[in-house]
Amino acid sequence: MQSPLATSDIETQAKIIGSFIILIWVLEIVDQLLLQHRLNRLGILPRTQVGLRGILFAPLLHGTWKHLIANTLPFAVLSWFTLLRGVTEFTIVTAVIWFVSGAGVWLFAPSNTLHIGASGIIFGYFGFLLSRSYFEQDFPSAAVSVVVALLYGPLIWGILPSRRRGISWQGHLFGFVAGILTARYLPELRQWFEQNLL
């Protein structure tokens, strides 16, 4: 039986996580140095038709270098914990969180606001990893939940309403909720995925 941390698995995980991080950094470099932040217009504009495209593009875009740097390490760590159970599960979890968190922001965030950044995905992984042990009741999931709580427990405050400019607490909240829902319905989601997409 192959170890869950076999070299091929580590290489695959590094390629997946590294590709996303490279993509968001390249997009930010291009946006800031060449496009004068015009890419940010592809973010989520709540309850507008044009803003629907932001559900797809918003997690790839960031407003400032500080915003991008703040999201890079938590994304790398939490996505790696999510990847430990395999690429298929990671794909399902990421896709559901990406869509549900974006749709929640589009539906419920204030009008005339723009929402960008990978924090919805990050909070989704956070919610997923914390709650998975409750639904699965096994030691590996519980161990990961404890480690994630110790490393990133203070993130939980980010789901509370905030008036701080540039902080999409709605993205945090709906990402977190999406993560919990994904953990709850993961067996059904996996079955649907295998029947319809594989």
Image (cartoon, rainbow, N blue to C red):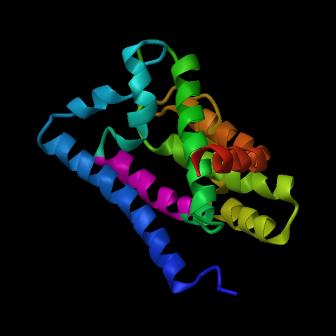
Extent of the magenta region? 65-79
Q: How many marks?
A: 0
Residue 11 seen in render: yes
As drawn, 5 above or below 173: below
Query: For residue 79, which quarter of the picture?
Result: bottom right
As drawn, 132 above or below 166: below
Foreground residue among 146 and 16: 16
Left or right of 171: which side holds 73?
Answer: left
Foreground residue among 43 and 160: 43
Q: Check if residue 88 falls in the magenta segment.
A: no
Q: Check if residue 75 falls in the magenta segment.
A: yes
Dominant secondary structure of the residues highlighted in magenta in the image: helix
Residue in view at x 42 percent, y 52 percent: 70
As drawn, 132 above or below 32: below
Percent across and percent down for residue 162 are 56, 29
Foreground residue among 68 and 107: 107
As drawn, 23 above or below 113: below
Left or right of 79: which side holds 55?
Answer: left
State the residue lying farthest toward the left.
Answer: 34
Query: For residue 19, which quarter of the picture?
Result: bottom left
Residue in view at x 66 percent, y 51 percent: 194
The quadrant the N terminus occupies is bottom right
State the residue lying farthest toward the right.
Answer: 137
